[in-house]
Image (cartoon, rainbow, N blue to C red):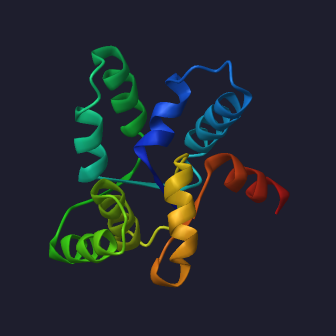
Amino acid sequence: MKIYLDVCCLNRPFDDHRQERIRLESEAVIAILDRSKTLILLSSEMVDLEISKIPDEDRRQKVRLLSSIPKVNIVMDDEILSRAKELNEMGFKSIDAFHIACAEKGQADVFLTTDDSLLKKATSYGEFIRVRLENPLRWLMEELIK
């Protein structure tokens, strides 16, 4: 199974865990990363770019370390640029459009994100998105039930 992790997922373990949702999502992300030997984790140049813009040096280094786990890196090309433009024209934020296009190009089975607005938008454009978008906690719970 191929999984593309959004940068918000890679950030989640370093967020404030006093909120139950954040703590549970963080544990789910760690559990998914722990399964990197049985899953194909995807990343992209867009992930690297977004991580490089994290203002806090310590956090940036921690997130970069987590992002180094993925085995397959999606390289930007004209197909991704074109698809990202289409997604952006549908109303997706530029960075989200690039992440979705990269996940599609890598033929991800699922794109994991903790961004509720992105999940909601992806649901409303379901037939136009060629990758399933899901919250990491919800996805992991479904996988454990199988």
Quarter where residue 104 is shown = bottom left
| Residue at the extreme bottom | 127
Q: Horizontal and vertical percent for residue 74?
A: 29, 60
Is residue 109 something that shows in the picture? Answer: no
Classify residue 26 as left or right of residue 82.
right
Q: Which residue is at 68% across, 18% downward?
A: 18
Q: Horizontal and vertical percent for residue 59?
A: 37, 20
Q: Which residue is at 52% across, 84% downward?
A: 127
Determine whether 141 is above or below 101 in the image: above
| Residue at the extreme left | 78
Determine whether 116 is above or below 100 in the image: above
Viewer-proximal residue among 122 and 135: 122
Viewer-proximal residue among 136 and 91: 91
Classify residue 4 as left or right of residue 48.
right
Q: Which residue is at 52% across, 50% downward?
A: 113
Q: Horizontal and vertical percent for residue 105?
A: 34, 72
The C terminus sits in image quarter:
bottom right
Classify residue 8 as left or right of residue 61.
right
| Residue at the extreme right | 145
Determine whether 3 is above or below 77 in the image: above
Q: Which residue is at 74% across, 58% downward?
A: 143
Is residue 119 something that shows in the picture? Answer: yes
Q: Horizontal and vertical percent for residue 30?
A: 60, 35
> How many numbered circles are shown?
0
Classify residue 40 as left or right of residue 68.
right
The N terminus sits in image quarter:
bottom right
